[in-house]
Image (tube, rainbow, N blue to C red):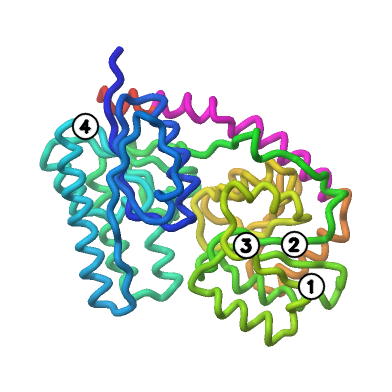
Amino acid sequence: MNKKDVCIVTFPLLHAGYTPISNLTRLISKIAGTVYLISGGPALEKLHLDPNVQAIKNVHRANSTLIMRIINYVRTQIKILCSVIVASRKVDSFIFFIGGEGLLIPMLALKLLGKRVMLMPGGVSAKVYEIEKDPLSKFMYILTDINFYLANRIVIYSPALIQELNVNRGNKIVVAHEHFIDSTKFMVKKKINERANVIGYIGRFTEEKGILNFVKSIPLVLKHRKDVRFMLCGEGKLSDEIRNIIQCEGLDAYVKLTGWVSHEDVPNFLNDLKLLILPSYTEGLPNIMLEAMACETPVLATPVGAIPDIIRDGETGFLLKSNDPKYIAEKTVDLLNKPELLEKVSKNAYKWVRENFSEEKTLESWRRILHEFETR
């Protein structure tokens, strides 16, 4: 049977988009004929593409003023529209991935051309705008809602996200993900009882990630445990504010800021941590959580997005009732005082993620999804 060509479309991606777009492109390239990838940004620059993947790059220019942000957003949509029209001469099936829920202009064009569009929101992007008190948040909710209506299929990471995305569209919805763990890279290099008391965060320094709450919890932890050190890996809008808090609180001796960490180096950082904290306000299905589990690094996270489907509190990880700094500190100290529990959970998490997030298992799901999508 001839493999059909597929086009993956995203908004230009920052560094954090590297792993999800790398995973999805790799999976689809094993199933489809030629894969056209319409994307851009720093994530695409580092992407290792298979021979049957053709990248079509677009650039998005960020701006701080509201009017210019809107103008540049529309400009980027028009650039993506032009790329989509070129691809539509050879492709009938399109997957709108990260940022795709806001791409109304390309979506309308493809519907007019009679093409099939699968929409796969990585998370609740409009909620990120809302958390940041961005005046465009209502606009993004509207765009997302229209695109949910227009899409032929909507792929979400977890049943828990149906309500959060407000995407109750009946038989349009498919629950799936592009996540898988490369066990040749993400492995246990140092047992948890051999690690120092280092608590870490790996991700973007942005409001929706709750990173400020974590930083503010550090002095509270140190009141109880002076033997704890903290490692913050990442960068973003809040980088300067985080540095100021560390300096003003006199935390320089206790906190290490690494800057952005390449994906190749993440396993080494995870193997140095006694606990990874993800205090997010909103999430999809964070890759770093699965990668930590594969390294036997326990995860303490807020129960948002698909996280509660993966972390069973006290069994495969730990859930925060609140990402308030006081609660983060209390829970962190409590867990550090229970090394046997940390060890048990780390082993459970390792076993669970290896069984449920292999490349073969994820690939088989996508074979079924793509076959059904192309034959409807």
Q: Are marks 2 and 1 in contact (CB under 8 Å)?
A: yes
Q: Which residue matches tag 1? A: 221
**Side of 10 where 356 appears, left or right:** right
Q: Nearer the viewer, mark 2 or mark 1?
A: 2
- Estimate the spatial distance between the alpha carbons at disc 2 and disc 1, rounded to whole Å: 10 Å
Could you say where residue 214 lies in the image, as x and y percent from the top left? 66, 70
Which quadrant does the N terminus fall into? top left
Residue at (16, 49) in percent of width and height: 82
- Estimate the spatial distance between the alpha carbons at disc 2 and disc 4, rounded to whole Å: 47 Å
Could you say where residue 249 lies in the image, as x and y percent from the top left? 72, 85
- Residue toward you, 191 or 112: 191
Task: Name which residue type carries label 2.
Answer: Ile
Mark 1 or mark 3, earlier in chain: 1
- Secondary structure beneath dot 1 equals helix
Residue at (27, 67) in percent of width and height: 139
Q: Which residue matches tag 3? A: 233
- Estimate the spatial distance between the alpha carbons at disc 1 and disc 3, rounded to whole Å: 19 Å
- Residue toward you, 96 or 282: 96
